[in-house]
């Protein structure tokens, strides 16, 4: 994962432990005070939320423990590697810019694509001017690598 992705996960973990977990414990206590737990929707909802938070804490902790952190700013290459920000042009002339990141930090709304995505796999090892062919449900899409940055 990238350094930015690691920092983001650490911030989420800190928020889950210091804000979300205590808040849901308080919600459970309030719901418990309302009496019969078998028919208490607030209690059930709070317990479900607590289960989600605890699962997310474990998931993030595991990802951080196993992560190999790579800072793209330290990379120097003419080829597309993990962490690269790549500008590609498709066969219709549409330009797209994206960064290749680890799965936990992939977010298409922020133009961050997972290294295991079809586009990223097609781009890895390519140079500026090379073509990458991606198989999609609508057929093969040909992208030309226009620019590679490590920022």
Image (cartoon, helix red, strand yellow):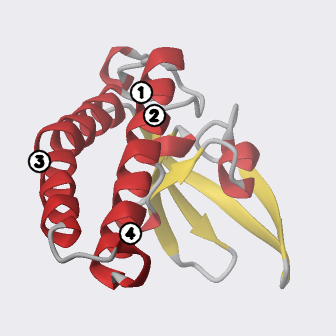
Which of the two discs, 1 and 3, sits closer to the camera?
3
Which of the two discs, 4 and 2, sits closer to the camera?
2
Q: Spatial distance from mark 1 to mark 4, Cα to Cα?
A: 24 Å
Task: Give the left or right position of residue 130, taking residue 71 as reference.
Answer: right
Q: Secondary structure at mark 4?
A: helix
Residue 84 seen in this snapshot: no
Q: Spatial distance from mark 4 to mark 2, Cα to Cα?
A: 25 Å
Q: Spatial distance from mark 1 to mark 3, Cα to Cα?
A: 17 Å
- Give the residue number, with chain letter if any, for mark 3: 19
Give x and y (percent) for residue 72: 38, 25
Disc sitting over residue 58 in the figure: 2
Classed neighbour count for the residue bearing mark 2: other residues with Cα under 10 Å, few (<14), some (14–19), many (≥20): few
- Give the residue number, with chain letter if any, for mark 1: 61
Circles 4 and 2 in contact, beta carbons < 8 Å? no
Q: Nearer the viewer, residue 13 or 32?
A: 32
Q: Spatial distance from mark 3 to mark 2, Cα to Cα?
A: 16 Å
- Which quadrant, please, contains the C terminus? top left
- Give the residue number, with chain letter if any, for mark 4: 109
Mark positioned earlier in the residue sequence (1 or 3): 3
């Amino acid at each position: 994962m990238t350094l930015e992705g690691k920092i983001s996960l650490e911030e989420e973990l800190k928020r889950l432990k210091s804000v979300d977990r205590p808040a849901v414990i308080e919600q459970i206590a309030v719901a418990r005070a309302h009496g019969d737990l078998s028919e208490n929707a607030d209690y059930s909802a709070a317990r479900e939320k607590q289960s989600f938070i605890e699962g997310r804490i474990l998931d993030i902790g595991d990802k951080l423990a196993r992560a190999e952190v790579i800072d793209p700013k330290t990379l120097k290459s003419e080829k597309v590697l993990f962490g690269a920000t790549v500008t590609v042009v498709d066969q219709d002339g549409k330009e797209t810019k994206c960064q290749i990141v680890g799965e936990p930090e992939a977010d298409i709304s922020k133009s961050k694509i997972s290294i295991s995505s079809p586009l990223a796999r097609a781009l890895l090892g390519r140079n500026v001017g090379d073509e990458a062919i991606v198989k999609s449900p609508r057929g093969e899409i040909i992208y030309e690598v226009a620019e590679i940055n490590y920022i």
